[in-house]
Image (cartoon, rainbow, N blue to C red):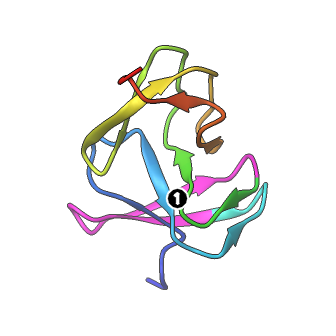
Amino acid sequence: MSAPDYLVHGSEDTVGVVVVESVKANAVLTGLDMSTGQTLHMDALADIPLGHKIALKDLAVGDTVVKYGHDIGKVVAAAKAGDHVHVHNIKTKRW
C-alpha cells in the first residue's frame, strides 16, 4: 500500500484524520486503520486540509465525534460520510 491519505485509530472512530497536504472534493482516498492495518477507502465530498477530519459515516446533530478512540465533541451541523469535519460542524462538550 502507498502512503495513506487519512488515518483511523480503530473501529470506534467516527472520523479519520487527513495526513496529506490537501484533499480535493471528489478524490478517492485511501486510509489506514492503525489498529488492524486494514486499508480503507473513502470518497471525499469536500476539500479537506491537512490535519482536519473526514467523516467515516453519516453524523447527525448531537452525535459524539470519536477520533483516535477519544470523544472530541459533538456534532452541531450534520455531515455525510466523506465530508470535512472541523470547528464549523463539531464543538467541544466542555462548554
Query: Farthest residue in the front direction?
Result: 95
Is 73 inside the magenta-drawn segment? no
Nearer to the camera, 71 or 60: 71
Q: Residue at x 49, y 42 (%)?
A: 56
Secondary element type, mark 1: strand
| Residues in magenta, as a range | 29-46
Is 43 inside the magenta-drawn segment? yes
State whether residue 14 is above or below residue 38.
Answer: above
Tell me: 72 left or right of 84: left
Structural crowding at the residue carrying mark 1, measured as other residues with C-alpha within 10 Å and reported as few (<14), some (14–19) or many (≥20): some
Q: Position of residue 35 (x, y in %)?
A: 21, 61
Task: Please state which amino acid type lies under the numbered disc 1.
Answer: His
Task: Place residue 82 in its image quadrant.
Answer: top right
Query: Farthest residue in the top direction?
Result: 62
Tell me: 65 left or right of 79: left
Q: Quadrant of the N terminus?
A: bottom left
- The mark total stands at 1
Q: Residue at x 43, y 19 (%)?
A: 63
In the picture of the structure, the residue carrying the numbered disc 1 is 41
State whether residue 91 is above or below residue 83.
Answer: above
